[in-house]
Image (cartoon, rainbow, N blue to C red):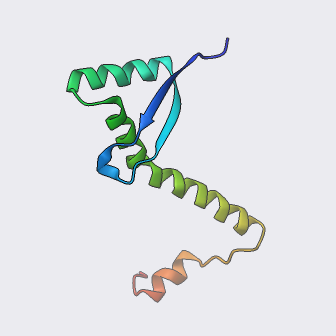
C-alpha cells in the first residue's frame, strides 16, 4: 500500500529574505511530528521546515557534486592526485 502524504504549504521564514513560497508533501508521521514540535515550542512548522532545509542543503549539494565528480573520474575525464603526493607537496608526508 502506498504511503499517504499530507500537504504542507511552506512559506520561507522572513529571517531568510527574500522569501519564496514552496509547497511540500510530507508523510503523515513526519507532518505529525512537525506539528507536535511546533505546538510544543510555540514556533511555526514553517520555521522548523526552513531550519531543516537550511541546515542540510549543503550536504545534499555536496553529495550530488561528489557523484558527478566520481562519474568523471571513472570515465577518465577527471584527474586525480595520489594522497602521498599531496601530503608531500604540503610537507605533511612521514
Answer above or below: position of 72 versus 91.
above
Answer above or below: position of 77 versus 17.
below
Q: Percent from the top left, x then y, of residue 86?
A: 51, 81
Between 17 and 26, the one nearer to me in the picture: 17
Q: What residue occupies the far top of the structure in this picture?
A: 1
Q: How many marks?
A: 0
Question: Is residue 71 shown left or right of residue 12?
Answer: right
Q: Percent from the top left, x then y, of residue 53?
A: 43, 44
Name the quadrant containing residue 68: bottom right
Q: Percent from the top left, x then y, of residue 81?
A: 60, 79
Q: Which image quarter holds the N terminus?
A: top right
Residue drawn at x 47%, y 88% as measured from the top left = 89
Name the quadrant containing residue 39: top left
Question: Is residue 28 shown left or right of residue 54?
Answer: right
Question: Is residue 70 shown left or right of residue 52?
Answer: right
Between 23 and 61, the one nearer to me in the picture: 23
Q: Percent from the top left, x then y, of residue 44?
A: 30, 30
Residue drawn at x 43%, y 22% as measured from the top left = 31
Residue drawn at x 45%, y 55% as measured from the top left = 58
Residue drawn at x 47%, y 86% as measured from the top left = 88
Q: What residue occupies the far right of the structure in this picture?
A: 75
Q: Which image quarter holds the C terminus?
A: bottom left
Between 10 and 5, the one nearer to me in the picture: 10
Question: Is residue 38 shown left or right of residue 72?
Answer: left
Q: What residue occupies the far left of the structure in this picture?
A: 41
Amino acid at each position: 500500500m502506498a504511503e499517504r502524504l499530507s500537504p504542507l504549504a511552506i512559506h520561507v521564514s522572513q529571517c531568510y529574505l527574500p522569501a519564496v513560497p514552496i509547497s511540500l508533501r510530507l508523510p503523515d508521521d513526519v507532518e505529525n511530528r512537525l506539528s507536535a514540535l511546533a505546538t510544543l515550542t510555540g514556533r511555526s512548522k514553517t520555521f522548523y521546515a526552513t531550519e531543516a532545509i537550511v541546515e542540510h542543503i549543503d550536504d545534499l549539494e555536496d553529495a550530488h557534486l561528489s557523484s558527478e565528480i566520481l562519474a568523471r573520474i571513472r570515465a577518465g575525464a577527471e584527474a586525480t592526485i595520489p594522497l602521498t603526493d599531496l601530503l608531500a607537496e604540503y610537507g605533511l608526508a612521514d
